[in-house]
Image: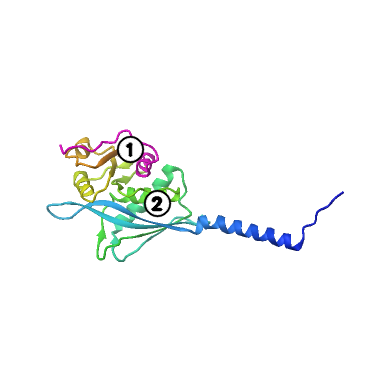
Amino acid sequence: MLRWLPSTQTLACLMTCLLLISLIEGQGYGASREQLIPILGVTTGQNQIGIVSYVRISFEERQDQGGLMLHFNTAPGRFSRMAQTSIEQGIRQSGRSLGISTDSWTVELSVPYAGMTIYGDSMSAMVSLSIAAMAQGKTVPAGYVLTGTVTPNGEIGQAGSVPLKIQAARTARLRRVVVSKQTSAVEHADNLPISIQISPVLSVQDALNALTDTSPIHSAISEGEPR
């Protein structure tokens, strides 16, 4: 009977290969991903106008399941307490709706504008689903934006001032604005600007598909002359 006994050199090579494999697998968890995403809002006070701002997201998936770790930077700009709460709720509710755990996520959010404070909750769905996309290895293309909230039953809640936000998106040369189907038809269809595609969605999954071009949105309203 033949018996093969590996040499010391062979064993060393095998151990080196196993170490390299473990390091490569570990990189999937340790690597931090960043993205600058647009959000839509309106100015405060009289004569409101729509504005497009950007938020920087840093995402890392840890090897432990110690729970969602969410950090809001306070400089250069910052998030209001309401904005922070709505974003955290949106992340958790999006994860539940999509069937993915947020317990291994570390997320850092920053506003790259000195002295700016972001108020309200209408950006929470955009932030939440951008993070969910990063967790799944997807990317939200440049020029795509979502305005709305994430409801406890896994739907996209409506946002206000949609016409002003769409006008701002057009001025900023964004290409697609995803809105809640609950938004009235008058709000998202009247005065439709040229070169903007409006994608009404109902569920969190539909919104993620619209943001990542995972599947076509058949109900999208194509560009047209202002009405």
Circles 2 and 1: CB distance less than 8 Å? Answer: no
What's the magenta region? 201-227
Q: What residue type is disc 1 on?
A: Leu
Q: In this view, does 101 lie to the left or right of 21?
A: left
Which residue is drawn at the image coordinates 29% and 46% (left, top)? 148
**Residue 224 coordinates in the image, percent (x, y):** 20, 37
Say the numbered circle drawn on residue 131. Answer: 2
Magenta span includes 19: no
Residue ID at (50%, 59%): 30
Q: Mark 2: few, some, or many residues within 10 Å (few <14, many ≥20)?
A: many
Q: Quadrant of residue 117?
A: bottom left
Which image quadrant for residue 105?
bottom left
Circle number at residue 202: 1
Measure how far apart labels 2 and 1 are at the Cα level: 19 Å
Q: Which amino acid does label 2 sit on?
A: Ile
Q: Residue at x 28, y 59 (%)?
A: 80
Secondary structure, mark 2, is helix
Residue nearest the viewer, comparing 195 with 86: 195
Q: Quick check: is 206 in the magenta stretch?
A: yes
